[in-house]
Amino acid sequence: MVTTDLGLDTRLVLLAAGLVFLWALLLGVVKYRQILASPEGFAHPYTDIAHRAALLYSFALLLIAVFVELSAWSEVVDLAAAGILLCYFVASIASYMFHGLRQDTDNQLRQPPASVRAFMGTLAVAEIGAFGVLLAGYVASL
């Protein structure tokens, strides 16, 4: 058996990547069922987006795990940064899934309420900032 000395922070991010990937696979089943039920042969756009986003975010989390592992910062700092990214990834997928299951819109950003505008603003700042912390941690380790 091969063992590695990955930090707890890295192992937790890898677990999150696996869980998000599993979620993507389950969303694939939902997408397939919607395709079968649709006279046009398409899933709702937000079901499709949720499925694709979950696949992409699961692999993004693998990349994040590498930066967490190679960062010069403490496990607490790295886990906090990764946790921020994970929270926004999960919130985005959940929002897409919600609209895909309700089939209530094909564009949640068309005339968005103030809460959605605020969320999008915090998403941009938080995701860029959190990854910037991890990238800086890697650069500091060089």
Image (tube, helix red, strand yellow):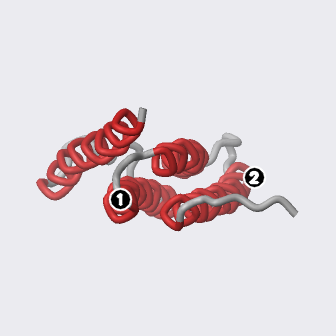
Residue 92 placement (x, y as % from top left): 40, 54
Front residue of 4/77: it is: 4
**Mark number for residue 36?**
2
**Mark number for residue 47?**
none
Q: Is residue 96 above or below residue 101?
A: above
Q: Quadrant of residue 135?
A: top left
Q: Is residue 105 above or below residue 79?
A: above
Distance between the Cα atoms at labels 1 and 2? 49 Å
Front residue of 7/102: it is: 7
Q: Residue at x 20, y 48 (%)?
A: 112
What is the secondary structure assignment of the residue under circle 1? loop
Q: Residue at x 59, y 44 (%)?
A: 59
Q: Is residue 64 above or below residue 79?
A: above
What is the secondary structure assignment of the residue under circle 2? helix
Give the left or right position of residue 74, taking residue 118 as reference.
right
Q: Label 1, on which residue?
A: 74
Whether residue 59 can be seen here: yes
